[in-house]
Image (tube, rainbow, N blue to C red):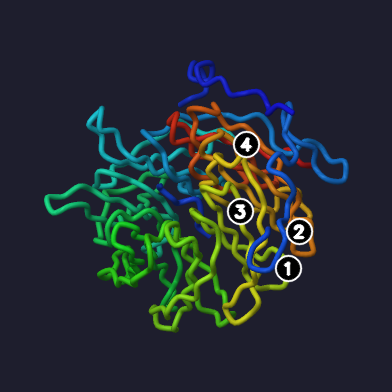
Amino acid sequence: MALAPRFNLAAQLGGLLAVAGLTGCCFTPVAEGGSTAGGSAAGRIATGVGATCPLGKSSMFGAQVAYTVGFAPTSVAVGDFNGDGKPDLAVANMNSAVANMDGTVSVLLNAGGGTFSPQVTYPVGSTNSTCVAVGDFNGDGKPDLAVATWSLAQNGENGSGSVLLNQGGGAFGAPMIYSTGYEPSSVAVGDFNGDGKPDLAVADPGDNTLSVLLNEGGGRFAEAVPYVIRHAPDSVAVGDFNGDGKPDLAVAIALAGTVDVLLNQGDGTFGAPMIYVLGSDPSSVAVGDFNGDGKPDLAVTDDMDATVSVLLNQGGGTFSARMIYRVGSGSGSDAASVAVGDFNGDGMLDLAVANEFDGTVSVLLNQGGETFGPQTLYAVGSEITSEPTSVAVGDFNGDGRPDLAIANGGDNTVVVLLNGCQ
């Protein structure tokens, strides 16, 4: 079967162009006692405006709409930045050496009906911007931005986290810059020391560390505390994995082929990692209660294997052997990012995966009983040039159904897919 009709970027540029806790921030089964789950890589292929929803409902995701953002977007996040009750988009843009441009973050305000206003870009104070996350860092009730960034320095590459405080009306102030490890690729938000203020965790693959920055109030952060992580951590996510009320960390480690879980010790510090072996190149990790037992589970994409693995929480912060599901159109699809949402309204959390090298996003519906069905593929741009790197979830048109936003690193756009399941 053919994919849904490809997006005509040139046509859209003439008119519309003017666009995801704590996932999709990554720059760059037969296994462990189980059998391969989820069927073939082909799965169910979307045609026309999308695949059919379960139980005879209407088509799920509609035609793509693209919005211009900065150069080489690597990450997209969702938040109501202007306080109008509609979720907006923030996009981390890498840089452009040709145009002598540093990294930026683009903010696109929701214009209603699932459409977005033209981007407003903000500097992040660094050469490269790799990941963006949202949190109210100064306690004023307005969502702020945290951006993982890095630059070239005389002694090599350095890393930082840039915090941009919301000034009201969806505008953001100048970046406040905090040092982290080298080449940070991912940032996540959680209240790690229980003081009611959101803190930051940053994955630093350049020096094999995870940096934790505690919020000191007023949107300012303490000096980063590094945790040594093996073999270049790529992505970090937050969840209370042992049920003690304190947020823990899950870290996807590409070169080691593992996901490491670090339990919170109660004061904003973290214990030694518990290691779970995955595929050849874990790239992104997301958290959700997939089997409805009240314990957060893990979903982890694998770049080179073109798979997403699901690890169920066994209690006490331990996880089961993984179940593997194929995504993309083949082994070279490069599963870059995963996000979680109940896309068909059955009360169970589903998965969305951005496939960087075939210009698609995979949607896998939760079948209950701790399993997912075969994927449905949706085109989000040119198979060759779009390079979707990040996916985020939000109800952009206010109909009560979660929609998708996908950052396309190859064509400098964010694509929005509205959910039509009714």
> Vertically, is 192 above or below 185?
below
Identify residue for label 1.
292
Q: Residue furthest left?
A: 154
> Vertically, is 200 above or below 340?
below
Checking the image for residue 417, the label placed there is 4
Q: Is residue 420 visible?
A: yes
Q: Quadrant of residue 63?
A: top right
The first of marks 3 and 2 along the sequence is 3
The local secondary structure at tag 1 comes to: loop
The local secondary structure at tag 2 comes to: loop
The first of marks 4 and 3 along the sequence is 3
Residue at the (66%, 23%) spot, across then down: 5
The first of marks 1 and 4 along the sequence is 1
Residue at the (36%, 33%) spot, across then down: 71
Considering depth in this image, is 240 or 210 the residue closer to the camera?
210
The first of marks 1 and 2 along the sequence is 1
Q: Amino acid at mark 3?
A: Val
Identify residue for label 2.
347
Q: Position of residue 104 (x, y in %)?
A: 32, 41
Identify residue for label 3.
308
